[in-house]
Amino acid sequence: MPRLRPAPSAAAESPALLPKRDLAFAWTLMVLLAALAWVLTAAQARGMGVGPGTMGMTLPLFLLLWLVMMVAMMFPSVAPVAITWAHAIGRQSSGWRRAVRTTEFVSGYLLVWTAFGLVAYGLLTLTADVVQEHETAGRWIGAGVFLVAGLQQLGPLKGVCLRHCRSPMYQLLQYARFRPRLRDLRVGAHHGLYCLGCCWGLMIVLIPLGVMNVAAMAGVAAVIFLEKLWRHGPWLGRALGIAFVVLAVLAPFQEWLLPGLGTDGTPMDQMMSGWTG
């Protein structure tokens, strides 16, 4: 009687650590993609106003720029998960199949941030309408945003999602048990949802700071990177949550804290020269 071969277990398909040489190449590629996205974002932001709303951008243009921003801000922090999963794909597939599966993973991740971009566009449009009708409303909107961001940083959802993002190998082993059909798309979307749950509070501070404020974007990206990869990242997140609450108290009385809610639409190059000059 022929001996039946056991079905491959999830462990057999689970991701493994990359050799140092491959790991260095993968990190370099992710950093280069993020750097290119930063260059494109900064070029688009130059000359645009740092003011309320979407600054006249249509929804398609906003979403396109939003995706470029997400690549710039999120790729360095998501690199450990993305690189390890891509390596697992490479062990199981090759050629065009490998390219398709990798594209599915990246698409699933960016699909989540695109959906959040739709929400951000709506919030920014609403904010612009309110500020144009009531100029003093900007300070209270800014205070509310900082307060919500602070509470999110200190809340339980942040802790759950941050633990997920800080333990990529455990999560990737769980992903290996997903059903094969559209697994890579679902893995990317699943991890993207955890990233969104971890970072949406940081993202919304771009409403009072300016959605095209490159300095603010860089600061938020640095915090996201440190929260996920630095051993003291959770403490940094809590400290920042307290700082946001303090800013919420100060915002109604300190308009300079809210460059993204002013009505003058100060261009980025003028604002940056003002800070450095």
Image (cartoon, grey):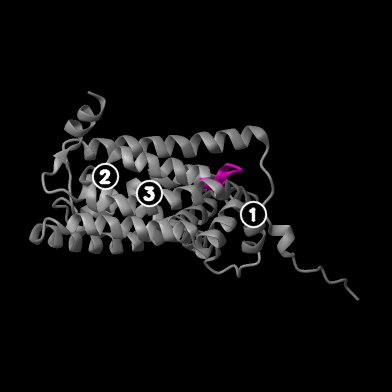
N-terminal of the two: label 3 or label 2?
Answer: 3
Residue at disc 1, secondary structure = helix
Quadrant, the C terminus: top left
Quadrant, the N terminus: bottom right
| Front residue (pair 8, 19) | 19
Residue position for label 2: 257
Do residues under tags 3 and 1 come within 8 Å of each other at their CB atoms? no
* Percent coordinates x, y for residue 70 in the rendering: 37, 49
N-terminal of the two: label 3 or label 1?
Answer: 3
Neighbor class of circle 1 (other Cα within 10 Å; few <14, some 14-19, many 20+) is few
Q: Which mark is residue 92?
A: 1
In this rendering, which labeled residue sits more in front, label 3 or label 2? 2
Residue position for label 3: 70
Q: Residue at x 88, y 71 (%)?
A: 3
In this rendering, which labeled residue sits more in front, label 3 or label 1? 3
Q: Residue at x 23, y 31 (%)?
A: 272
Residue at disc 3, secondary structure = helix
Q: Is residue 96 left or right of residue 88?
A: left
Q: CA distance from mark 3 to mark 1?
A: 28 Å
Q: CA distance from mark 3 to mark 2?
A: 24 Å
Q: Residue at x 24, y 53 (%)?
A: 252
* Percent coordinates x, y for residue 245 in the rendering: 39, 54
Q: Is residue 110 visible?
A: no
* Percent coordinates x, y for residue 160 in the rendering: 56, 62
Q: Outermost residue, bottom direction?
A: 1
Q: Amino acid at mark 3?
A: Met
Range of residues picked out in magenta: 227-233
Q: Residue at x 61, y 68 (%)?
A: 178
